[in-house]
Image (tube, rainbow, N blue to C red):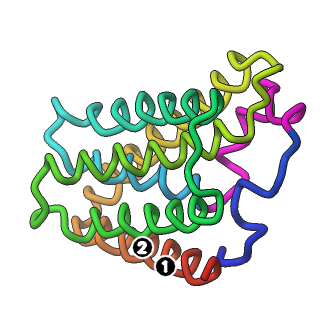
Amino acid sequence: MAAGSAHAHVGLGPAQAATWFSGLVHPLLGADHLLAMLAVGLWSAAAPARRRWQAPTLFVSTMLLGALAAGWGARAPASGLEAAIAASVAALGALLLGRAVFPTAWCMGLVAAAALLHGMAHGLEWDPATPWLAYGAGFTLTTALLHLGGLGLGLALQRMHAAWLRVAGMAIGGAGLAMLLARA
């Protein structure tokens, strides 16, 4: 997972990135996206039932804003975006480890920041001369499904033992640190 090719942003051309299918598979192609989306779902599993939808909804909506902003010209420092995304994976893993320690508002802020970064990466691969709707709908659907999968996995892990969520947090955080070191 630490190799550069494990990341979803390996230089897809804009024409490829603007299709429904490429948007649909984009979050699945890189460990950075896959782990971040699963982490948000896992973290949501530990929330009270009435609030489990909040973090995934915040992530998806903020990711879309980041994608649109980047697609329409807002730029993050290109050299640091991938490192920031890797750091966001490590931070989301830390959320699972410190669930009882961190205030919910701080955690939701971190979820939004991670979503913005991931969205900017999606948006930078979009060519404004091509239709955005298909690509955006594709990566949005897959993101939501990964959150749902993480939520289901988190609920199953909690039924086995609550410590399994912390184990998942250690694995995701460790993978994020490895990706970050690979970028250094």
Real-space Cα distance between discs 1 and 2? 6 Å
Contact, CB < 8 Å: mark 1 with mark 2?
yes
Determine whether the residue tagged by mark 2 lies in a helix, strand or loop: helix
Nearest to the observer: residue 149 or residue 24: 24
Above or below, 42 against 112 in this view is: below
74 relative to 18 in the view: left or right: left
Q: Whole-percent x and y of residue 89?
A: 46, 63
- The residue that appears at 40% across and 38% down in the rendered structure is 59
Q: Quadrant of residue 91?
A: bottom left
Look at the magenta stretch and give its main secondary structure: helix
- The residue that appears at 75% across and 24% down in the rendered structure is 128
Q: Which residues are magenta?
A: 14-31
Instruction: Give the amino acid type for the residue marked by disc 1 in the picture.
Output: Leu
Above or below, 172 against 71 in this view is: below
61 relative to 79 in the view: left or right: left
Q: Nearer the viewer, mark 1 or mark 2?
A: 1
Q: Whole-percent x and y of residue 18?
A: 80, 27
Determine whether the residue tagged by mark 1 lies in a helix, strand or loop: helix
100 relative to 23 in the view: left or right: left
Residue at the spot of label 1:
177
- The residue that appears at 59% across and 75% down in the rendered structure is 179
